[in-house]
């Protein structure tokens, strides 16, 4: 089974398309956890315990782990999520050329899927694309305002850059392991991209703190019922001021998002 087959099974098992972003900003970790050897791991473990019944996947962002203790915390986090039967999508946005990108692709020895940057073209992504078991989410239309600086530029063909990226990703999907990252902050573009690439699952960020459109995220983000709608800060820091009870608030936030999204699922 490849990643999207496994994700399909997970979505059916928990009746959820919620992706929980595990971005443990050290400055926001509750004080009682900062005395642990690996505070980020201690934080993530409690979040996973509180949210796994509502999570189709976990999405740690590599930026919060890129130091020696951070990588240890990430490895523990991935192993623990797997122990709960939850797949892990590493938000790393990697790509390069030659042996560098082959080295980056080794991250898939741990995680089940990864986000990649298409700016350098297909050869920069080939080691990821050739891993038939892994999921590869190609950045397409991001939810940040500055994404328009490049993604909205019009090509000679009249199409914007992000639509060309979607078309290329569809061509690269030879192993049925490619998806797109498409933000929820512009629902009309979500709809247009779904029409363009009907078979590619989307990872849809921007629902939580960025205020994206939940209905559009579900209606256009899923392909044959498979896709992910991510919330990071809106879940993991829902109980930021609740001391030792912070994880319970995160569990409730994940449950609320699950119910909210399920209103729009077939």
Image: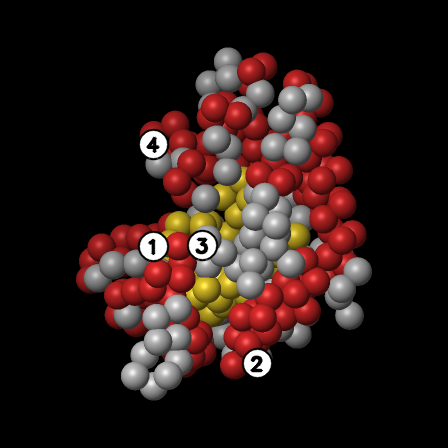
Identify the disc placed on residue 94. 1
First in residue order: circle 2 vs circle 3: 3
Q: Up-down: is 120 above or below 251?
A: below
Mark 3 lies on a secondary structure that is helix
| Residue holding disc 2 | 195
First in residue order: circle 1 vs circle 4: 4
Q: CA distance from mark 2 to mark 3?
A: 23 Å
Q: CA distance from mark 4 to mark 3?
A: 29 Å
Label 3 packing within 10 angstroms: few (<14), some (14-19), many (20+): few
Q: Up-down: is 160 above or below 207?
A: below
Closer to the observer: label 3 or label 1? 3
- Residue 201 seen by the camera: no
Q: Residue 36, position in %: x, y?
A: 51, 17
In the rendered structure, the answer to whether residue 155 lies left or right of residue 262 reads left
Mark 4 lies on a secondary structure that is loop
| Residue holding disc 4 | 67
139 or 105: nearer the viewer: 139
């Amino acid at each position: 089974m490849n990643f999207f087959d496994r994700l399909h099974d997970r979505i059916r098992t928990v009746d959820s398309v919620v992706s929980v972003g595990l971005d443990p900003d050290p400055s926001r970790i509750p004080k009682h956890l900062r005395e642990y050897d690996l505070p980020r791991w201690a934080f993530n473990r409690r979040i996973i315990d509180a949210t796994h019944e509502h999570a189709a996947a976990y999405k740690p962002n590599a930026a919060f782990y890129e130091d020696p203790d951070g990588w240890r915390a990430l490895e523990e986090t991935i192993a623990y999520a797997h122990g709960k039967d939850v797949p892990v999508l590493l938000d790393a946005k990697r790509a390069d050329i030659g042996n560098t990108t082959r080295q980056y692709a080794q991250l898939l020895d741990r995680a089940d899927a990864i986000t990649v940057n298409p700016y350098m073209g297909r050869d920069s992504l080939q080691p990821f694309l050739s891993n038939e078991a892994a999921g590869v989410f190609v950045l397409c239309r991001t939810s940040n305002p500055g994404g328009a600086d490049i993604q909205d530029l019009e090509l000679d063909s009249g199409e914007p850059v992000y639509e060309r990226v979607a078309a290329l990703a569809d061509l690269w999907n030879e192993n049925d392991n490619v998806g797109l990252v498409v933000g929820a902050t512009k629902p009309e573009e979500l709809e247009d991209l779904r029409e363009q690439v009907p078979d590619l699952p989307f990872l849809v960020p921007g629902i939580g703190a960025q205020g994206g459109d939940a209905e559009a995220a579900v209606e256009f983000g899923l392909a044959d019922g498979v896709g992910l709608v991510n919330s990071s800060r809106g879940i993991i820091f829902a109980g930021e001021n609740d001391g030792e009870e912070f994880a319970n608030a995160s569990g409730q936030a994940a449950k609320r998002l699950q119910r909210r999204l399920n209103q729009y699922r077939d």
